Amino acid sequence: MTNFIFKDSLALRAGNVQLTADLAVPEAAKGLVIFSHGSGSSRLSSRNRFVAEHLQRSRFATLLFDLLTEEEDQRQENRFDIALLTKRLIDAVTWAQQNDYTKNLLIGLFGASTGAASALSAAAALGNEIIYAVVSRGGRPDLAAGVLPDVQSPTLLIVGGLDEEVLDLNRWAQDRLQCLKDLEIVPDATHLFEEPGALEMAAQLATDWFRKYLEPGKQHPLRESW
């Protein structure tokens, strides 16, 4: 059973709006993973929450938040405004750096679907001294094509083996990333990882990546030379 020092919903200030967020901080947390959900989704995404609970059991703090207000989400174009979503994600990182429960934790980003583009864009903007790792699940890193060479944070791309179009896009993005990177294919999984065991495998791959790069003292030895 996981014991938490904080687990509740709260308001996260981002620019001139307030966004609803769910923060969970286990005892002796190893790091913080901030989630960026896909278009048409929210902090209540069942798949992201599944991954978050998996991370919490491994003593990682998690922050899931709505990237858009209810009013903003009514406009379809906002859901694909990568610049806006990236700004919101950066604001969430800044908030976490100031929050009493999370300010001393190393930060990683987890992006799902279009959320992967904002996660990679935020990592490119902030650098690997702030964002220590990025994981994309069924992501669209191609939507961040212009900044992929600027990402320095170790990046893991997780894609379903049957999600052929997205797999091709991730291979394309992997070639353009200049950071430490890996592509993991979950066999027989489609885009939503609905097949038995598929989401569990994706969650474990993500957890292993964050264990490698977020736990203090376990950062890659080449980090200082990147």
Image (tube, grey):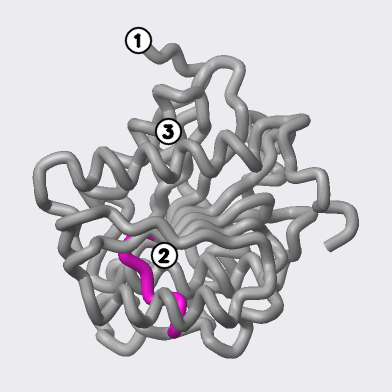
Q: Does any portion of residue 36 appear in the rendered image?
A: no
What residue range appears in magenta? Answer: 137-142
Residue at 29% from the left image edge and 76% from the top image edge: 166
In magenta segment, residue 138: yes
Q: Are marks 3 and 1 in contact (CB under 8 Å)?
A: no
The x and y percentages for residue 151 are 67, 71
In magenta segment, residue 196: no
Tag 3: amino acid? Leu
Residue at numbered disc 1: 1
Examine the rendered structure and indicate whether residue 131 appears above or below residue 27: below
Circle 2: element type: loop
Tag 1: amino acid? Met
Tag 2: amino acid? Leu
Mark 1 or mark 2: whose residue is earlier in sequence: 1
Residue at 34% from the left image edge and 32% from the top image edge: 53
Q: Could you tell me how far apart the alpha carbons at marks 3 and 1 are, in whole angstroms?
A: 13 Å
Q: Quadrant of the C terminus?
A: bottom right
Residue 64 lies left or right of residue 148; in this view the side is left
Image mark for residue 67: 2
Examine the rendered structure and indicate whether residue 69 appears above or below residue 204: below
Residue at 40% from the left image edge and 68% from the top image edge: 115
